[in-house]
Amino acid sequence: MLLLVPLEKKIELRRFPVITILLILINAIVFFVGQANDDKKQEEAVEYYADSGLGEIEVPLYLKYLETADGRGDSKEDKEKISYMKDGLKHNKTLVYSQGFFLSYNDNKFIDELLYKETIITREDAKYSDWKHYREVFYDKLSGSLTYGYGFISKEKRPITYITTQFLHGGVMHLVGNMVFLLFLGIAVENIFGSFRYIFFYLIGGCAATAFYSLFTSDSMIPLVGASGAIAGLMGMYAVSYGFRKINFFYNILFYFNYVKAPALIMFPLWLGNEFLQYYANEGSNVAYMAHAGGLIGGASIAAFMSLFKTGVDREYMDENVKHDNLVERMDEANTLMGQLEFDKAKRIYRQVVTDHPYHLDALKKLFTIEKHKPESLDFLSTCNKIFKVENAAQPVVEEINKIFKEYLVLTNNSAQLDTPHMIGLAIRFCNHGFLEDAERVITAAINSGHNVNNLNMAIRVFARELEDLDPSRSLHYKKMLAD
């Protein structure tokens, strides 16, 4: 068994996957509310089958079919059914009638001749009218459950069920497993195509999955339920959209699992090949492998079509993911070099990171550590000014910058030049987080610079306000500056 799952970024508020979350909620509501009474309704239908006389009519007909139809009766399964029905009709008719539905329902050829060709019981048969009535009532009762009423049945191919089957599930674990995959893949695909196109493509992918599945099960009366076909469509869209961009994947082969970084497109043939392999290796399985394959093909086709256009696909988002992964790799490499005391090599990587990500505080802090041994250098001054321009106002970040600021003052003996216009914002952040002494140093330097510094009055006003309770006289002194 092969499992491959792309590891996307966490949910971001600026790109919140509204439709993905909504789909998960709808699937959960449909299952826990809509399908809550499915088992009971199906049991009632089966009881009707046994008690109405429908089983009494159909079981002997099915037994006769197995014994006389060409090519039937010789397989192990047919022999077991024949033996069971013969014994039941002799000793416990009620039991065998109650099992009649389950015995024959999966036999596609028998059901086809019984219900659609009407060659098992014909219009000339004396029991035909009763049988037809019982069948209609039984079908209404069975269709009262969402599984049979709105699941996709290949033999019937009702158009609405191409959509509705995508929101039905066969059990709690079936639902949970699908929703986990939907969350992993939905975040990425929704951000690639946008919410409106995403929901449309999701449903189209699900319909493609169902249509492909029906090619392999054209006579089946078993309802197909589950979102996995539509989710496979997302997998196809993901692989083709990301193309040769390298993505982190979690994989599981039997009892072994690990992570691998590989071009997304390579995953498509692996996913598709695995579905065909599982289909032919697990004959008779309840898993709809061909629905998964159809979804993959449908989703890949949608993404390939969209790639022809320059609009409608957020390539910046996909590149952003790749850049993020590259950033992590470069930082890990530089940190390793730092640990090996290869400072010059590490410095070159950190500088490249800062070039691509100007306000990456971790890289700037590492550069500060390397360059602080030459506080008179222009590189050191440049790094410090970049650190002080970081506008993140979160308490831990401001605390980190304040520590660096204090060390900076010690290393330069309070004489180094500051990029004054950009320091005003830092002074305000220092005020807001209680670092008033350092805020005053910056404000004083700006005042003494003799330049017309933007937002200086705002910084003085904030500083004076913070001083009101601590030192009223100094607060008044700065307020008078504003008046002057």
Image (cartoon, rainbow, N blue to C red):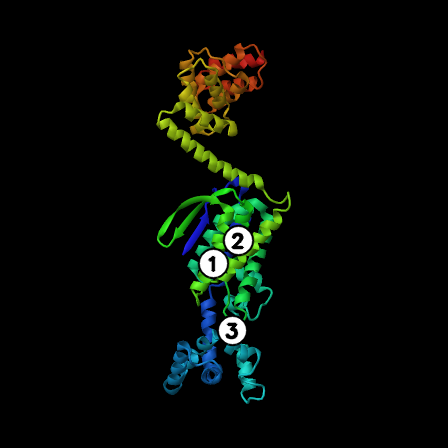
**Residue 456 in picture, x, y percent from top left:** 55, 17
Q: Earlier in the sequence, mark 3 or mark 2?
A: 2
Foreground tag (2 vs 1): 1
At 51% from the left and 67% from the top, the residue drawn is 223
Three-letter amino acid code at the position of disc 3: Lys
Q: Name the residue under label 1.
A: 275
At 44% from the left and 66% from the top, the residue drawn is 283
Foreground tag (3 vs 1): 1
Inter-mark Cα distance, 3 to 1: 35 Å
Q: Which of marks 2 and 1 is nearer the N terminus?
A: 2
Q: Nearer the viewer, residue 275 or 367?
A: 275
Three-letter amino acid code at the position of disc 2: Leu
At 59% from the left and 64% from the top, the residue drawn is 160
Q: Name the residue under label 3.
A: 141
Secondary structure under tag 1 reads helix
**Residue 320 in picture, x, y percent from top left:** 53, 38
